[in-house]
């Protein structure tokens, strides 16, 4: 079996704010298109082989990177018993067909306040006229989820970018050498997993899921999972305590591709458990920034104001910048969206992103959400 421990970026910076200014670019993997051989084949032949796969069969034409579309909220449902998660269904104001997407895809919501937030699509890819997302209200976060909850009512309109996909599903026997799928979701992490499970079910792939969370009241979409019967195990912390990686993994035989979405500690424990397991693919998506590894202390000076902020060895440079300049733009906080990029005036950056090109770095750009300083001080054009 092929080893495929994939360090996929998380795309839901639900606690992150952006003022929406500045260039926004994304790496090519966020725009997987109809050129993908597995999905290309399904796009063309699934009407024959998988009649229920329906409209996912249209070849994908991804939207331009910075193109925005205005959508209308046509349905708003509370989908967790604690009433802290809403599912919003969007359609075009003129009800025209929307750009297609595949399981693992997400939208960028450009909120009226200027904040930008990314949310997984959790509806049915074969429905080409609506998109659906699920949003947990996070008091004390960056304010984006609260704005969504408080302002996006039925009939309201919002601009979006996307869909894009940074958490693609590779099908066993086609894009993957695995023979089974194991889905691991925690809380709101169910959102990208829902359409994956539905796809696996439709395509007759052997799959199972464990869905965890604080309590039954806190986890959304449980009623939608009921149709999958015993393929889905719901395990809540209040009844069973925190699950171990082995419990999350279920069977430990090889030949399985694991798709995992949840909090960083869960993902990190799964990653370390699977080190050396060349027979298990691990695909994951984070909802919060990764911890700083091998960080150093340095200071960052804002050239326009002369203000200086100290960056501790375990904190993002972006976080220190926000203390001094709260309006600084950001979104993903993981080095893939490009929203936070700033130009270095002096000092040597320690680039830790996989987004900027050599030319952009040579021109002085850096991404302070993941990158740091190779010395004691950086001066930036902010
Ligand atoms: S916030 Fe997305 S790259 Fe920094």
Image: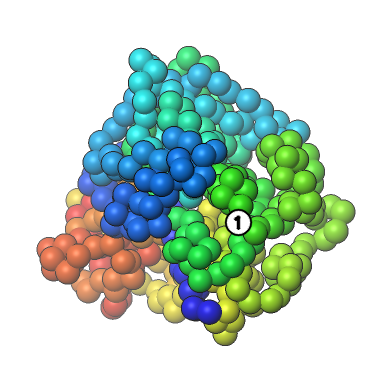
Check disc 1 and report the residue beneath it. Answer: 205
Query: Within the image, what quadrant is residue 80 found in?
Result: top right
* Left or right: 65, with 345 as reference point: right
Residue 285: x, y in percent?
A: 51, 58
Please determine whether, in this image, residue 236 is positioned above or below residue 110: below
Q: Along the line of sight, which residue is nearer the eye, 375 or 21?
A: 21
* Left or right: 31, with 212 as reference point: left
Q: Residue furthest right?
A: 239
Q: Along the line of sight, which residue is nearer the eye, 24 or 41?
A: 41
Please determine whether, in this image, residue 19 is positioned above or below residue 71: below
Query: Within the image, what quadrant is residue 188 found in?
Result: top right
Residue at position x 69%, y 76% from top?
253
Mark yes or no: residue 304 visible.
yes
Please determine whether, in this image, residue 163 is positioned above or below residue 252: above
Residue 113: x, y in percent?
A: 39, 29
Residue at position x 28%, y 62% from top?
355
Q: Is mark 1 within 8 Å of ligand 1?
A: no
Describe the element under mark 1 as helix, strand or loop.
loop
Q: Residue furthest bottom?
A: 276
Residue at position x 56%, y 50% from top?
203
Mark yes or no: residue 118 visible.
no
Residue count near mark 1 (Cα–Cα under 10 Å), binned few <14, some 14–19, many ≥20:
some
């Amino acid at each position: 079996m092929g080893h495929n421990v994939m360090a996929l970026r998380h795309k839901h910076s639900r606690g992150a704010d952006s003022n929406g200014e500045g260039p926004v670019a994304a790496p090519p993997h966020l725009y997987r298109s109809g050129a993908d051989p597995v999905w290309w084949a399904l796009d063309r032949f699934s009407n024959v082989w998988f009649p229920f796969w329906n409209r996912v069969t249209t070849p994908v034409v991804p939207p331009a990177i910075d193109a925005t579309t205005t959508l209308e909220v046509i349905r708003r449902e509370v989908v967790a018993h604690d009433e802290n998660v809403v599912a919003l269904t969007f359609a075009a104001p003129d009800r025209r067909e929307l750009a297609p997407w595949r399981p693992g895809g997400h939208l960028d919501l450009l909120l009226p306040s200027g904040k930008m937030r990314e949310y997984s699509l959790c509806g049915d890819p074969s429905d080409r006229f609506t998109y659906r997302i699920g949003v947990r209200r996070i008091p004390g976060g960056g304010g984006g989820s609260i704005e969504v909850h408080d302002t996006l009512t039925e009939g309201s309109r919002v601009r979006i970018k996307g869909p894009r996909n940074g958490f693609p599903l590779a099908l066993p026997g086609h894009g993957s050498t695995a023979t089974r799928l194991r889905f691991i979701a925690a809380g709101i992490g169910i959102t990208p997993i829902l359409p994956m499970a539905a796809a696996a079910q439709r395509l007759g792939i052997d799959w199972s899921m464990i869905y965890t969370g604080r309590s039954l009241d806190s986890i959304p979409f449980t009623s939608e999972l009921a149709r999958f019967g015993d393929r889905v195990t719901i395990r809540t912390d209040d009844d069973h305590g925190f699950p171990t990686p082995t419990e999350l993994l279920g069977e430990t035989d090889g030949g399985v591709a694991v798709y995992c979405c949840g909090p960083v500690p869960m993902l990190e424990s799964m990653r370390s458990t699977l080190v050396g397991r060349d027979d298990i693919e691990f695909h994951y998506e984070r909802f919060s920034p990764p911890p700083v590894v091998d960080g150093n202390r340095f200071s960052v000076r804002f050239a326009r104001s002369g203000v200086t902020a100290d960056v501790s060895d375990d904190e993002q440079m972006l976080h220190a910048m926000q203390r001094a300049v709260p309006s600084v733009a950001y979104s993903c906080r993981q080095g893939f969206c490009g929203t936070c990029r700033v130009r270095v005036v002096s000092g040597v950056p320690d680039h830790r992103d996989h987004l900027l090109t050599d030319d952009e770095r040579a021109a002085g750009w850096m991404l302070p959400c993941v990158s740091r300083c190779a010395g004691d001080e950086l001066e930036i054009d902010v």
